[in-house]
Image: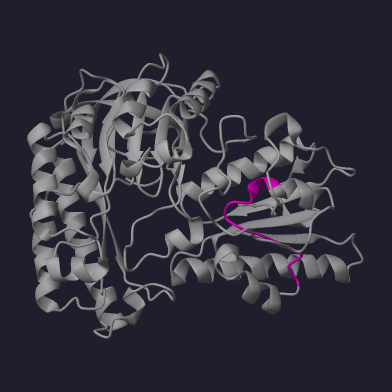
Amino acid sequence: MPISLPIVGEREPAGPHVRPPQTPQKVYFVSLGCPKNQVDTEVMLGVVRAGGHTLVDDPELADTLVVNTCGFIDAAKEESIETILELARVKAGAAEAGIDPKRLVVAGCLSQRYPTELANEMPEVDHFLGSADMLGLQNVLGGAAQRMGVSPLDRRSWLYDHSTPRQTYGAGHTNYVKIGEGCDRPCGFCIIPKLRGPQRSRPVFDIVQEVHDLVGQGTREICLVAQDLTTYGTDLGERGLAPSNLEGLLDALGEISELRWIRLHYAYPTAVTDGLIERIATHPKVATYLDVPIQHVDTGVLKKMRRGYTERTVRELVERIRAQSAKIWLRTTMLVGHPGEDEAAYQRLRAFIAEGEIDHLGVFPWSREDGTTSAMHPERVDDALANARASELMELQAGIREQKFAAMRGELIEVLVDGISDESELLLDGRHEGQAPEIDGKVILLDGTAEPGDFVQARVMQTTAHDLIATLDLDRDPDDDD
């Protein structure tokens, strides 16, 4: 995804103030990383559109090549570097063929983290833009930008709002909305505060206006994202804005009539309130789904991670969620191989997962990141062992989820239709309330017709470890297929 260069002093307002270029450009994008990056990319696409430029899906046809990078862990950094080099080869090939020179722009978290190193080691890159510099892309495309466009991050760093140009891509009936940027938590393994800056929340009215506009364009599901949803609003008062919190935001968004599902991504375990759980369980528009990265359950490992809670905290959180409703779908991530994770700590984590309270799980081996406190811990876990632990936990969870899905056979569920299935043009793909887009599997609809964005009732006929297979014929008996 693209990003922009620094604008000294106060930044220009977005939207109609985007200046048209002297020469329209054809622009090719590659967007890497998380949903927060996707939103940034969509802002960049909006800058391109508002500036009178054209998007192309072939790098050979582009005047400007933009890659929005991820710099979170080693694997993401490697993917970003490989993508940059790939586009650099396209640029070099065009030059050798005597074609008008292409410009290569590297944006996002990797640029923010290593601006000087990348500039020195990659002379083929024409412009570098940081993680809060999206609007600066207009200067790059207009030919009025310096090579280094990475701005320092602070509490006054730029944050998009409802008037910012944004062009969403993918399924129009579901979209991500970023309600804040940055993070103030001191987690020992995480580099995000250095990549994204401190916590910066958008005002409630601004988020409501953006969602209202998206719904007017056909969006029926929004996925709220932030590094930590549950600290939303804590900084608004100190910035002279009306204070709020996540519960108040959900109440306000719930008033938008054509909005059907509000999905929550990235809550912090110690900040999940009873009021938030109640809204997830009972609010007609808040999906019965919560993405809360737990990371570990062993108290000793959590202390080394600087997470600020214990195994008891984790278990009490799960108990509070299940006490409110057994139908809340719980997604989490776990980090294995962190320094200090001995066999006993790992087995404690494994036993927790084996209890089956987690519905969707991601497991990642620890990655040593310079600039984090975890990188200085001496009690390292062998990489091969960490990878083996991650694989074991994912295999364990696959069996658990297969059992959970099997128990849904014959159940009547509401499905949001995403479109024609990847399996066959005779099938439809959709998701039930407990499945986030492109993350948690899908519902494959065997029969009937529906349009993307439609909500339909379906009966579960068969299940796998990843997907549900359902019918729109509600009178059909799953046992008839045996």
Quarter holding residue 351: bottom left
User: Looking at the rendering, in which quadrant would you find the C terminus?
Assistant: top left
Image spot of residue 35 (x, y percent)? 46, 47
Image spot of residue 275 (x, y percent)? 20, 31
Residue placed most toward the observer, 60 or 322: 322
**Residue range of the region highlighted in magenta in the rendering:** 124-135
Q: Is residue 395 above or below residue 465?
A: below
- Could you tell me which residue is drawn at 20 percent across and 64 percent down? 393
- Could you tell me which residue is drawn at 16 percent across and 25 percent down? 477
Residue placed most toward the observer, 413 or 305: 305
| Res. 157 visible in picture | yes
Image spot of residue 203 (x, y percent)? 46, 31
Q: Is residue 339 magenta?
A: no
Q: Is residue 318 above or below residue 411?
A: below
Q: Is residue 132 magenta?
A: yes
Quarter holding residue 372: bottom left
- Could you tell me which residue is drawn at 71 percent across and 39 percent down? 12
Image spot of residue 177 (x, y percent)? 47, 36
Left or right of 303? Residue 165 is right
Q: Is residue 119 above or below residue 307?
A: below
In this figure, what is the number of numbered marks? 0
Left or right of 361? Residue 210 is right
